[in-house]
Amino acid sequence: MEAEHEFVAAHKIQTALIQQEVNGEKFDIPMLLIHAHDHMMTSMTTKDLAKEIVELHKKTQKN
């Protein structure tokens, strides 16, 4: 699947950038901050999706 391939490629790039920062390279915006933000946004999206699934499940159980 093309999307999966692109996700893997992007993850490898992100990991390399974080490793560069850990090894002392400086970036205008810290890579670790960006990585933490990614985790936060993923968690928020997962929470919202879970709430939607629960609501849909409740609606189907009423019928």
Image: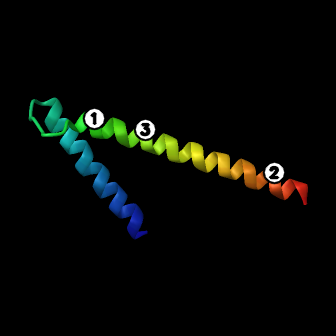
| Residue behind mark 1 | 33
Q: Which mark is residue 40?
A: 3
- Residue 19: x and y in percent read 19, 36
Q: Is residue 24 above or below residue 60?
A: above
Left or right of 52 in this view: 9: left
Separation (CA) of disc 2 from disc 3: 27 Å
What residue is pinned by disc 2? 58
Q: Nearer the viewer, residue 52 or 24?
A: 52
Mark 2 burial class by Cα count in 10 Å: few <14, some 14-19, many 20+: few
* Mark 2 element type: helix
Query: Measuring 27% from the left and 50% from the top, which residue is drawn there?
Result: 12
Q: Earlier in the sequence, mark 2 or mark 1?
A: 1
Q: Looking at numbered disc 2 in the image, what kind of residue is underneath it?
A: Lys
Q: Earlier in the sequence, mark 3 or mark 1?
A: 1
Q: Residues within 10 Å of mark 3 (few under 14, many from 20)?
A: few
Residue lying at the far right in this picture: please name it: 63
Measuring 43% from the left and 69% from the top, which residue is drawn there?
1
Between the C-alphas of marks 3 and 1, the distance is 10 Å
Residue at screen point 36% across, 63% down: 5
Name the residue at the bottom extreme: 2
Residue drawn at x 40%, y 65% is: 3
Q: Quadrant of residue 36?
A: top left
Q: Amino acid at mark 3?
A: Met
SS at circle 3: helix
